[in-house]
Amino acid sequence: MIRLFLAAALAFSAAATSHAQDANEAAAYKKFLEELWVDAKAKGISRANFDLAFNGLSPDPRVIAATKRQPEYGKPVGDYVNMLVSTRRIEEGRRKQAEWQKTLDAVEKRFQVERWILISIWGIESSFGAAKDKWDVFRSLSTLAFVKYRHPYFRNELLVTLKIMQDGHIARKDMVSSWAGAMGQTQFMPTNFVDFAIDFSGDGKPDIWNNVSDVLGSTGNYLKKGGWKFGLPWGYEVTVPSGFDYKKSRGSFADWAKLNVKRADGGALPGTGDAILFWPAGSKGPGFLVTANYDVLKEYNNSDAYAIAIGHLADRMAGGPPIKAPWPTDDRPLSRDSRIALQKKLHSLGYKVNTFQGNFQGHVDFDLRDNIRDEQIKLGMVPDGNSTPEFMDRIGLTGMR
């Protein structure tokens, strides 16, 4: 009897605690919206539209969970690339190229961005428009802004989204997005929509949700303004000679040719231009020479796995070969928390670490990989710039995975 009483008491206590937490969160969210209204009003948003956006909303716990399991970081790079660059997607992309050839001709001519890159982004972001967004954009963005995830980025995106609705680009009921607020068939963040979405079809308004001509034209505009160079490959899979110095990471194509670095497909490297040598899964896996266009792809989505998948899918649809070197079976990417810990550790060792608005975000860029190389040399490891769990242990971050 006492045991039953204790169990009931514990259940009541847990329920009461949960209810109190919910009430506290609701009060905090209400205060957040009150503060947001001040900024929205200053930007010309009407009270009616503000209420239309947020009436009945509450923070979405699924969005918070999603910040911790982004697929381009949670999977081994090889698994992620192979998942996205599937035979089905290659074949479907070729069919879409034939179906939209005239539009792609026009987009390619106007923006000087290769069609296969555009089709690749379209295919990966929404399965060529077949995969529909399902998250309420205002709930998702307000949740991220409320918890100050990457603050103030998502708060600013939320204010821009209010303006998009108020300007009549899309009805409130149709304002769905990814969990992080990316919208349309090629997943533009709200600011990207304002900066890059265009009316390529000529029907009077830019529609990246339903109008394929606008989707392709807007994506071409995005990449062009991001610095895309027509005719410059995103990169090449390469092989290196026996005894290669893995500390070498930057140089011109001429420099790489002198070091006997060769394209894996047997083709010739360009005679001009620069490239970074990159081992996404370490020296035991495929290596790539990547160009400035690779950086443009990372501006679209700041993930090496994503950029490789976009570039490789484009190559495959255009008739290129599969990646030749096998991906390591023991590749274990670090979690976001571990990548942030790595950034902080290297910063404490005196290295310059790139941040987002002063905050560590866990992005392992090429500068950080060079820092890792320096530490790998000190530790007697192969300096391939890859942050493995073993490397984390060796620099004092034991247990970070």
Image (cartoon, helix red, strand yellow):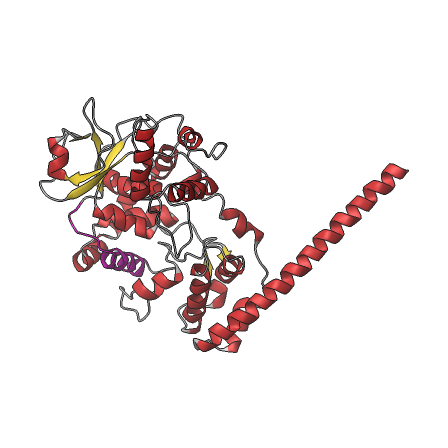
Judge whether residue 217 is colored magenta: yes
**Residue 222 vertical position relative to residue 396 in the rendered view, above or below:** below
x 13%, y 39%: residue: 253
x 24%, y 30%: residue: 246
Count all numbered tags in the image, as a single digit. Answer: 0
The part of the image, by quadrant, that contains residue 277 is: top left
x 56%, y 66%: residue: 32
Q: Main secondary structure of the magenta part?
A: helix
Judge whether residue 294 is colored magenta: no
Left or right, 109 with respect to 5, comes to: left
Q: Nearer the viewer, residue 380 or 226?
A: 380
**Residue 201 vertical position relative to residue 370 in the rendered view, above or below:** below
Left or right, 70 with respect to 114, comes to: right
The part of the image, by quadrant, that contains residue 269 is: top left
**Residue 383 vertical position relative to residue 155 in the rendered view, above or below:** above
Confirm whether residue 207 shows in the render.
Answer: no
Quadrant of the rendering where the N terminus is positioned:
top right
**Residue 100 vertical position relative to residue 253 in the rendered view, above or below:** below
Could you tell me residue 365's position as x and y percent? 32, 44
Q: Which residues are magenta?
A: 212-232
Could you tell me residue 256's position as x and y percent? 15, 34
Confirm whether residue 198 shows in the render.
Answer: yes
Q: Residue furthest left?
A: 271
Could you tell me residue 323's position as x and y percent? 27, 31
Left or right, 273 with respect to 299, comes to: left
